[in-house]
């Protein structure tokens, strides 16, 4: 072990497009807490109530629940199906939808927001509810992200899914991470521990990798594109070389199909043309560079395939509603004129 956390194991059969997307995944504001639930119990979470509590002002809140011990079910509002998860498995609610969790016996749900004080927390919160029967331990993570992977209209992920790591290295890594998280979030441990920030990010990224690499094939959406023999290589090229002056003809030649076939696949599976997808990905990378580096606007423009700052600024404003410098200033909380890199 080189650092405070177990090394993340490689995912099974991850596509280049998936790897390139996850490599740029930007997660923020990680919060960890624990739940100690005893039969019979049920708890409601998600929605704006929880989002406003843990990440005020965040557009999207991603939630995941790692079952450390016991057994529970989870159900998203509006869905009739209950999904069961056992120890070592991870429940992911990528869009933060309202949902209910519970144990084996029936119980009246309690709102999770009623069980903790408002942040900031000096120690890791522990949610306790139930009637004193068999216990289920759950480690919960809350993060925010403006990554397109978590844009509901893109349809990259289902509203809720349970990740069951395959036997071997992945399972061992999850189990050791759970043990570390439980120890690091024990009563009395302060929230300035690294586990409060980095471990939730690592766990969620690995769960997404496992899910997307092994999810059943679908007909539409981002996940379907990752497994499509035409789209996957085209998406990988866009993700890894966004600065190239791509045309539909260039992309089609690289993946050995006609322009019409490529255009049809993009529109049919992803709901957008190849050039629109390229532009959206470029804007995603531009946002990442503006938010995480001191690169000038003109440097960012060149890195995402624009010859001039003016052309890039027009495209960026169409996508976000703000000029690059103003967007950066808003993100940093500094006046636009003092934002780094113009």
Image (cartoon, grey):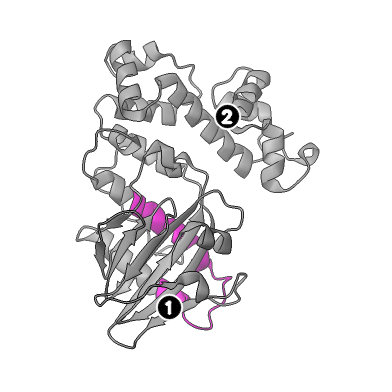
Q: Mark 1 points at which residue?
A: 183
Classify mark 1: residues with Cα within 10 Å, few (<14), some (14-19) or many (20+).
Answer: few
Q: CA gap, disc 2 to disc 1?
A: 44 Å
Q: Which quarter of the rendering shows the C terminus?
A: top right
Which numbered disc covers residue 319? Answer: 2
- The picture places residue 330, in percent across and down from the top left corner, at 70, 43
Give the image location of residue 197, x and y in percent. Answer: 52, 62
- Could you say whether the residue bearing mark 2 is in a helix, strand or loop? helix
Could you tell me which residue is drawn at 55 percent across and 48 percent down? Answer: 59
Dominant SS in magenta: helix
Q: In this view, does 14 lie to the left or right of 122?
A: left
Q: Does the magenta stretch include residue 190?
A: yes
Is 186 on the left or on the right of 208, as rendered?
A: right
Dot label at residue 78: none
Residue range in magenta is 181-208
Q: Is residue 54 magenta?
A: no
Q: Is residue 210 above or below residue 65?
A: above
Sequence order check: which comes first, mark 2 or mark 1? 1
Q: Residue 331 in the image: x percent, y percent?
A: 66, 45
Residue at the image point whose x is 30% and y is 30% from the top: 232
In the image shown, does 208 or 64 lie closer to the viewer?
A: 64
Mark 2 is surrounded, within 10 Å at the Cα level, by few (under 14), some (14 to 19) or many (20 or more) other residues, namely some
Determine the image quadrant of residue 23.
top left
Q: Quadrant of the N terminus?
A: bottom left
Q: Which of marks 2 and 1 is in front?
A: 2
């Amino acid at each position: 072990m080189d650092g405070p956390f177990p090394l993340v194991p490689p995912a099974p059969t991850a596509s280049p497009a998936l790897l390139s997307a996850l490599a740029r995944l930007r997660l923020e504001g990680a919060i960890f807490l624990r739940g100690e639930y005893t039969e019979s119990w049920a708890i409601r979470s998600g929605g704006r109530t929880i989002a406003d509590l843990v990440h005020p002002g965040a557009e999207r809140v991603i939630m995941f629940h790692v079952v450390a011990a016991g057994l529970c079910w989870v159900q998203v509002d509006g869905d009739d199906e209950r999904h069961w998860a056992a120890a070592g498995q991870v429940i992911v609610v990528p869009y933060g939808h309202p949902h209910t969790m519970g144990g084996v016996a029936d119980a009246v749900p309690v709102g999770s927001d009623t069980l903790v004080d408002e942040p900031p927390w000096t120690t890791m919160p522990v949610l306790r509810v139930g009637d004193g029967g068999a216990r289920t331990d759950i480690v919960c993570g809350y993060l925010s992200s403006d990554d397109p992977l978590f844009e509901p209209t893109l349809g990259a992920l289902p509203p809720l899914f349970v990740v069951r790591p395959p036997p071997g290295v992945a399972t061992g890594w999850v189990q050791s991470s759970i043990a570390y998280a439980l120890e690091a979030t024990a009563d009395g441990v302060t929230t300035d521990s690294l586990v409060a920030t980095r471990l939730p990010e690592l766990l969620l990224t690995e769960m997404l990798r496992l899910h997307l690499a092994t999810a059943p094939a679908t007909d539409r959406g981002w996940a379907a594109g990752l497994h499509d023999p035409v789209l996957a290589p085209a998406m990988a090229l866009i993700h890894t070389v966004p600065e190239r002056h791509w045309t539909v003809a260039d992309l089609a030649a690289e993946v050995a199909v006609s322009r019409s076939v490529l255009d049809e696949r993009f529109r049919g599976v992803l709901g957008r043309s190849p050039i629109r997808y390229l532009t959206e990905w470029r804007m995603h990378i531009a946002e990442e560079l503006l938010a995480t580096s001191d690169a000038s606007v003109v440097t960012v423009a060149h890195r995402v395939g624009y010859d001039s700052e003016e052309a890039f600024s027009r495209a960026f404003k169409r996508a976000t509603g703000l000029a690059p410098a103003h967007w950066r200033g808003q993100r940093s909380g500094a006046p636009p004129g003092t934002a780094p890199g113009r």
